[in-house]
Each structure stands twice: as C-alpha cells, then as structure tokens.
Image: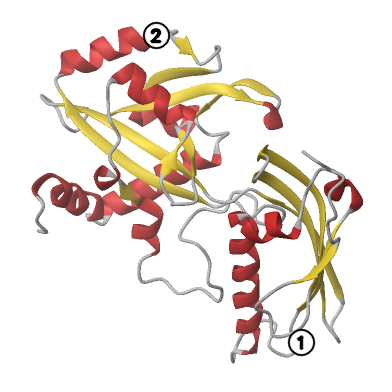
Amino acid sequence: MDSAQHVATTFILPDWTSAVPVHIRPDAVNDGLTRDHVENFTAFKNWTRTLNKNLSLQTQPGHASQADPWKLQEIIIHHVKFQSPQSIRFMTVEAKLRRKYEQPLALDRVVFLRGGSVAMLMILRPRDLRTERQVIMTEQPRIGAGSTAFLEIPAGMLDDSMEVRGKVLEEIEEETGFTIQRDELIDLTELAMRGTETPDQLEAGMYPSPANMDEYVTLFLWEKVLDRQEIEDLKDRLSGLKKHDNMITLVICNYEEIWRKGARDSKTLAAWALYEGLSREGKIQDELYRIRTGRSR
C-alpha cells in the first residue's frame, strides 16, 4: 500500500449535531489509512451511528445520565489491519467522552472494532428418537485464549450484505454435506429479545466484551432430523478429521454435555441458555414447525 499519498490526519465526524474530530494517528496514516477507508468501514459506521443514537437518548426522562449527559469529544484511530488494499479487517480506536458535573468527568475507552459475527447451535436429531440430540462443534486455535484446541459452537462473520460466511461454515458444508440455508436458521437472539425494552438501542445480538469491543454475536439455531445410522456414520467420518491446514476439527457432542464441555466459550453458553429458555416457552417448537411446514401453528 502506497504510504506516500497525501492523507488528511483529521476530519469531522459526519451527521453529528456537534463537531466531533476524528484523528488518524501517524502510524495508521503510514499504513495507508485514509478518511474514505474509515468512513466506508462498516464496523466504524455502525459503531458511531449507535453511539450517536444512544448518547441522544440520555435526555429522556428516567435515563441514568439525564442530569449530566456524556458527550463525545473526539475519536483517535490508533491502528488498522487491512484485509486488502481497500478493505479493513480490524481497527483500534479511542473514544473520549466528557460530562460536566459528576465524577468521573472523563470516560476514555480504547475500542477494538471488528463488527458483527454469528455463531450457530447445530442440532442433529435421530428420526427414531427425536428427544435425543447431538451437536456439531469445532476445535480450533484461539490464540487470544492461549489455546490451540478451543471447543466451541461453529462461528462465522457477517459480511457487508449481512450474509453469514466463514471457513468454519465452509468446512461443515464440505465435510458433512449439509448446506446451511438462511431460511432454515432460527435467530435465537432476536426471538429472545422480541418485545423487551432496554434504555439503549443496540443490535439484536450477544455482546461478549462490550467494555472494549463493538462485536455482537447473532446466535442462530439450525436443526436437522436424520436416520440414526447417518448420525453414527457422520461421527465416524468426523472423528479426528482436520482440514484447512489442520486449523479446524469438527466434533459431535451429546447435547446434554455441551454446557459443561463448552463452559469456556461465551457463544456456546449463551446459545445453550437461549435455546433452553425459548424451548420452555414453546417458541423453538413453533419456529421449527413454521420452517418445516411454511405455516404458523
């Protein structure tokens, strides 16, 4: 990437009632980051739009910050990781907020921007005993946790068109033959949050680390009924199988054990908890009936 091009290091955030400067630090400028890159990065656009919207809600009666609202003073962009010359993968920014009266007067936070992601609870039921459930899980390196074999439910990214993508889902389709269609998925997070009220307007997803990350995870359910022998054959075929340069291993676990085996993974625990709660209310059964018949019951 040509770092010699002329790039402005400061610009004003558009669509805010008060002027909020965005400063691009020299290291990020040298990496080729421009204003256009920043303004076209979906994660940055969504994060600033959400922050703007929720800061404006502080004036509503009963809001915790109504008497002394926070204001965004500036944003500093510290670092960027490009996926391609025109596409940003990750960005590290610092948001500086201020208020007038109550201590603390300053709220400065470094935020890692990566955008939304998805995770999928994939349940297989044998045709002869549909109360029995098996779950497709993955083992792969998660270096942030210091792990080379982290057990979790399958996860992927949301692209700019909000479609699910990712190597894990490609691997599942390749090794199981299952094609994951969007209309077969039940959005557990949206279903659970339907009708609930919160003081902020946020994405219908689970936020694993909201203090310092914008990432939200949409949790889906996908269920398939198979002959028992098909499930057993799948277990045998996947046992110890690795692909994608030995990065991903597919594992089939008994559903009754995933809350223990997946206890280190927030996605797994959250999906399990939502599935259990929604099942008790009969909502999972209603959604599965709708998917299989095209009718509501």
Location of residue 235 with respect to 77 vertically, above or below: above
At x 65%, y 70%, the residue is: 51
At x 72%, y 49%, the residue is: 91
How does the figure colour the protein chain or chains? secondary structure
Q: Amino acid at mark 1?
A: Asp
Residue 234's image quarter? top left
Q: Secondary structure at mark 1?
A: loop
Tell me the number on the disc at residue 68.
1
Q: Which residue is mark 2?
A: 239
Q: Residues within 10 Å of mark 1 (few under 14, many from 20)?
A: some
At x 42%, y 42%, the residue is: 164
Q: Secondary structure at mark 2?
A: loop
Residue 126's image quarter? top left
At x 43%, y 9%, the residue is: 241
Q: Please identify the residue farthest to the front as the structure is shown.
A: 5
Q: Is residue 104 visible?
A: no
Q: Nearer the viewer, residue 133 or 37?
A: 37
Q: Amino acid at mark 2?
A: Ser
Q: Nearer the viewer, residue 118 or 81?
A: 81
Counting residues from the N terminus, which is met first, the one under dot 1 or under dot 2? Answer: 1
In the shown orientation, is residue 261 left or right of residue 69? Answer: left
Residue 231's image quarter? top left
In the shown orientation, is residue 147 left or right of residue 221? Answer: right
Residue 82 horizontal/vertical position (percent): 70, 40
In the shown orientation, is residue 293 left or right of residue 189? Answer: left
In the shown orientation, is residue 267 left or right of residue 2? Answer: left
